[in-house]
C-alpha cells in the first residue's frame, strides 16, 4: 500500500512538472534587446513581454509607468491563454498608456486572458487621436474559455473622443470567449458615436461584479445582457437598469482621472466576495472598483486570503483516499456573498 501511495505521488509530481508554464518579467528599467524576461534581466515594454508568452504563461509587470506601448498581437490557438498581472498587486503602481495609432487598431489582441492589478490609460488628442475605426484598447477572446479582469482601472479620462467608432475600452472577439470583470473601474470613455462602449461584447457571456462605471457613453453593448450585481453606474450617457445590489450614486473619486475613493464614498464596503478572485478586503465587505481602502484607513483587519488548492494540497487529498482522514493544510473555501 505504501509503495502504491508513493507511486501516485511521484506520478502527480512529474505530471505537474511536465505542464509547468513560464513566467516572464518586464520593468521600465529593462531592455527589450538584451533582456531575456527573467526577474534579473527584464524586458522594458509590456508589448515585448506579451509577444513571447505561450499558453499558460504569466507576465509580471513591474511597478512603474509604461508609455507609448504600441500594437501587439499574440492570440495563440483557440481556447489558449495566459496571465498579465501587476507585480505589487496594486493597480495604481502599474500605469500603461496605450498608443493605438489612427485607424482600425486594437492595442492588444489577446487570447483567453487573466489580467490583474494594473491601470490601462487610453489617451488621445485632436492631433493624435489614437482612436480610429473600430479601435479598442484591448481585445480579448480566441475560441472557448473565460477571460477574467480583476482590479483593473480602464482610464479614458484624457481621451478626447476623436475617431469614428472607438468601440470599446475592452472588447470581445466575435464568437470568442466569455469574460468576467471583478473590481474594475471604467472612467471617461465617451463620444458622440453610438458604438462607444466601455465593454463591447459580441455575443459573449459577460459577468460584472464590484465594478464602477462613470462618464462613459455606454457601459456595455446595448444589445448584450450581462450578469450584473454590486456595481455602481453614475453619469453615463446611457445608464443600464440596475440589479438588486447595484447603485447609481457618484462614487466620489479623489481626482478627475483617479480610481481612488474618498472617505465616505458609497462604494466603500458595498461590494461582494467572489470565490478565488475577490477574497481580501479591509472593511466589512469589498469596495467597488479597482481601489480598496487601505487597512489603516478602515481600522479593520482583513480576513486571511484564500485561493485555489495548491499542488501539494492535491497530492495530500489523493493520499488521504488511501490512508484516511483529511489532508493536512487543506485550504478552506472562500467566503462568497449572495447575488
Image (cartoon, rainbow, N blue to C red):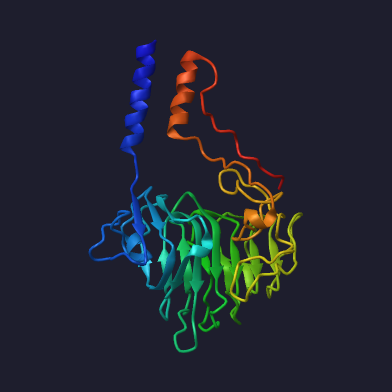
Front in this rendered view, residue 310 or 164 = 310
Look at the image and tell me in which quarter the N terminus lies: top left
Indicate left or right for 125 with 249 as reference. left
The residue depicted at 31 percent of the width and 59 percent of the height is 42
Most extreme residue toward the left, as rendered? 34
Position of 78 relative to 326 (above/below):
below
The number of numbered discs placed on residues in the rendered structure image is: 0
Indicate left or right for 127 with 192 as reference. left
Q: Position of residue 107 (x, y in %)?
A: 42, 70
Q: Position of residue 272 (x, y in %)?
A: 68, 50
The residue depicted at 35 percent of the width and 56 percent of the height is 25
Residue 202 visible? The answer is: no
Position of 244 relative to 28 (above/below):
above
Position of 107 relative to 206 (above/below):
below
Q: Position of residue 207 (x, y in %)?
A: 61, 54
Position of 257 relative to 16 (above/below):
below
Residue 123 visible? The answer is: yes
Front in this rendered view, residue 307 or 240 = 307
Q: For residue 298, which quarter of the picture?
A: bottom right
Indicate left or right for 177 with 60 as reference. right
Most extreme residue toward the top, as rendered? 1
Front in this rendered view, residue 14 or 94 = 94
Q: Position of residue 249 (x, y in %)?
A: 75, 67
Indicate left or right for 137 with 32 as reference. right
Amino acid at each position: 500500500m505504501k509503495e502504491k501511495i508513493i507511486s501516485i505521488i511521484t506520478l502527480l509530481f512529474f505530471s505537474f512538472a511536465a505542464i509547468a508554464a513560464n513566467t516572464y518579467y518586464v520593468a521600465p528599467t529593462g531592455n527589450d534587446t538584451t533582456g531575456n524576461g527573467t526577474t534579473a534581466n527584464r524586458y522594458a515594454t509590456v508589448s515585448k513581454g506579451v509577444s513571447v508568452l505561450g499558453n499558460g504563461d504569466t507576465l509580471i509587470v513591474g511597478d512603474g509607468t509604461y508609455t507609448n506601448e504600441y500594437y501587439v498581437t499574440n492570440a495563440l490557438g483557440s481556447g489558449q491563454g495566459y496571465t498579465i498581472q501587476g507585480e505589487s498587486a496594486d493597480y495604481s503602481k502599474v500605469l500603461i498608456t496605450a498608443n493605438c495609432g489612427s485607424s482600425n487598431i486594437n492595442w492588444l489582441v489577446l487570447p483567453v486572458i487573466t489580467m490583474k492589478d494594473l491601470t490601462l490609460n487610453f489617451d488621445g488628442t485632436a492631433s493624435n487621436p489614437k482612436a480610429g475605426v473600430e479601435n479598442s484598447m484591448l481585445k480579448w477572446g480566441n475560441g472557448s474559455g473565460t477571460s477574467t479582469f480583476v482590479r483593473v482601472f480602464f482610464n479614458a479620462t484624457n481621451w478626447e473622443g476623436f475617431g469614428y467608432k472607438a468601440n470599446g475600452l475592452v472588447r470581445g472577439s466575435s464568437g470568442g470567449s466569455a469574460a468576467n470583470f471583478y473590481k474594475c473601474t471604467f472612467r471617461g470613455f465617451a463620444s458622440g458615436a453610438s458604438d462607444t462602449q466601455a465593454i463591447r461584447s459580441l455575443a459573449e457571456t459577460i459577468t460584472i461584479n464590484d465594478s464602477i462605471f462613470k462618464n462613459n457613453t455606454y457601459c456595455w453593448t446595448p444589445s448584450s445582457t450581462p450578469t450584473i450585481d454590486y456595481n455602481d453606474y453614475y453619469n453615463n450617457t446611457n445608464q443600464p437598469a440596475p440589479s438588486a445590489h447595484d447603485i447609481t450614486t457618484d462614487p466620489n473619486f479623489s481626482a478627475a482621472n483617479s480610481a481612488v475613493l474618498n472617505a465616505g464614498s458609497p462604494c466603500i464596503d458595498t461590494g461582494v466576495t467572489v470565490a478565488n478572485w475577490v477574497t481580501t478586503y479591509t472593511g466589512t465587505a469589498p469596495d467597488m472598483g479597482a481601489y480598496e481602502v487601505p487597512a489603516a484607513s478602515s481600522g479593520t483587519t482583513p480576513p486571511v486570503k484564500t485561493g485555489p488548492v495548491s499542488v501539494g494540497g492535491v497530492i495530500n487529498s489523493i493520499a488521504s483516499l488511501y490512508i484516511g482522514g483529511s489532508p493536512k493544510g487543506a485550504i478552506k473555501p472562500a467566503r462568497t456573498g449572495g447575488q
